[in-house]
Image: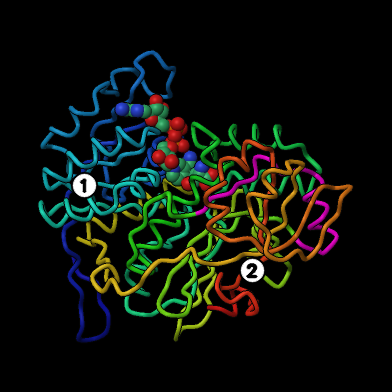
Amino acid sequence: MSLALSTNATISAASPAPALRIGLIGFGCVGQGLYAILQQVPGLGFEVGRIAVKSPDKPRSLPKEAFSFQADELLHDPALDVLVEVIDDAEEAFRLVSTALRQGRRVVTANKAMVAQHLPELVALQHEYGGTLLYEAAVCGSIPIIRTLDAYFGQEPLRSVSGIFNGSSNYVLTRMGQDGSEYAPALAEAQLKGFAETDPTLDMAAFDPRSKAIILAAHAYGVLLQPDQVLNLGIENVSATDIAYAAIANQKIKVVAGLYLLPDNQLTVLVTPQFVDQSSPLYAVDDEFNGVVIEAEFAGTQFLRGRGAGGHPTGSAVLADLAALRGNFHYAYPKLAAAQLGYTTDLEIEIYLRTDDELILDQLGFTDITEEADEDGYIVGFVPLDALLQHRDRLRQAGAFVARTGNVRPATQPADTLALAEVE
Ligand SMILES: NC(=O)c1ccc[n+]([C@@H]2O[C@H](COP(=O)([O-])OP(=O)(O)OC[C@H]3O[C@@H](n4cnc5c(N)ncnc54)[C@H](O)[C@@H]3O)[C@@H](O)[C@H]2O)c1
Ligand SMILES: N[C@@H](CCO)C(=O)O
């Protein structure tokens, strides 16, 4: 068959390539989301060859014969062209994915905790055995942020990459802010809608967006971080008092992950609640939506917004990876090769802290108090970032709520107070 373009030009339509056979490991929210998309849009060139699940007795939308109960069978099935790993167990996911990569296989995963913990090994396995691992679905659901940073901005210095990287906590904050909902029912809704992790502490205490920030640090800056190097504070202890404090100043509380390039080629990364005002594009990112602001040296500011969680949006990102694999795409990790940046936490950041625990106040060591209100039990001022890192667990256990104002300064030069945006 040929398509006429003009009087003397034609394009020959190649016969369609055989469908890629997928081995799908995990049939929960994301696995079913991908499966539904492939059923709804036939002819995409992908076929679900086999599906592995864990529990034989769980009621499912497909007959029992459709499933294998041993993921390893899929690993060793030569008739499968690509494996999609979407289970909720990071350790087992690493075993499965690393075994597949050792066979030189093509693999897609959505497991950010696994990727963040094992990125150096996963990169090395791809180099050694020639397989490919893609994980766009692991960061910000449907937003194509990893490929944007890796391929599009692979050569350009970035001043910052910041945003809302967790749909569940954003959903809870939106319900509390818009409807006056209590924390617990709002979280139950996020779980019911399939946004939350099996252990929702990962979302609410900001472990999940920390994993995503670590992945982006590798692609945006070529810096490989261990989870413990990055401060993560969440919203488990947020209250109506905190939401009202923000609202009085026409602000919202959002869990913001920030990757900031500081002077002297130092990167810092932190994930905490933050007061966001209407001048920020993140202000209007509500419900389970995520948003990412890229401040690039030459391109200027770019903002991406989209659904950050849920079966269909995440299935869409997995589908995009499958299509990319068919085109032999792989991450180039261009900045990893350059590896020119250091990492620092030697900063003081301005925080709002609400607590009735005198000990934690002493331990954090405020260097400057900006505002204090005894009756509501909050204090605003500068604390060393290292003190927050050291006392993170105690803050959680003590029921304290922390949000940053956005101001930061080098720990050694307390007079130079700057907004992070200005430091960038
Ligand atoms: N839900 C989302 O919106 C979303 C978005 C992006 C990424 N993710 C990630 O995708 C992965 C899956 O998330 P989900 O929401 O679908 O979780 P889920 O809990 O809905 O489903 C996971 C499924 O994996 C199964 N499973 C566990 N171990 C298994 C094994 N060894 N073999 C086969 N099946 C196994 C579980 O029984 C469960 O049914 C997680 O890593 C999650 O962090 C989820
Ligand atoms: N639990 C995650 C899923 C998407 O990664 C979230 O709420 O953002």
Closer to the camera in the image, 255 or 196: 255
Q: In what element is the residue under mark 1? A: loop
The residue stretch that appears in magenta? 231-251
Q: Horizontally, is 175 left or right of 34 in the view?
A: right
Give the residue at mark 1. 19
Q: Determine crowd level at label 2: few under 14, some 14-19, many 20+ residues with C-alpha closer than 10 A.
A: some
Q: In what element is the residue under mark 2? A: helix
**Do callouts 1 and 2 mark residues in contact (Cβ within 8 Å)?**
no
Residue drawn at x 42%, y 21% as measured from the top left? 60
Please check the rendered image and state whether residue 321 is part of the magenta-colored stretch, yes or no.
no
Residue 36 at least partly seen:
no
Closer to the camera in the image, 352 or 15: 352
Q: Amino acid at mark 2?
A: Pro
Give the residue at mark 2. 281
Residue drawn at x 31%, y 51% as measured from the top left? 44
Q: Horizontally, is 108 left or right of 310 in the view?
A: left
Q: Is residue 291 above or below residue 361?
A: below
Q: Quadrant of ligand 1?
A: top left
Front: mark 1 or 2? 2
Position of residue 111 measured from the top left corner of the image (x, y, whole percent): 37, 43
Give the Cα distance between marks 1 and 2: 41 Å
| Chain-order first, disc 1 or disc 2 | 1
* Color theme of the render: rainbow
Residue drawn at x 72%, y 37% as measured from the top left? 183
Q: How many marks?
A: 2
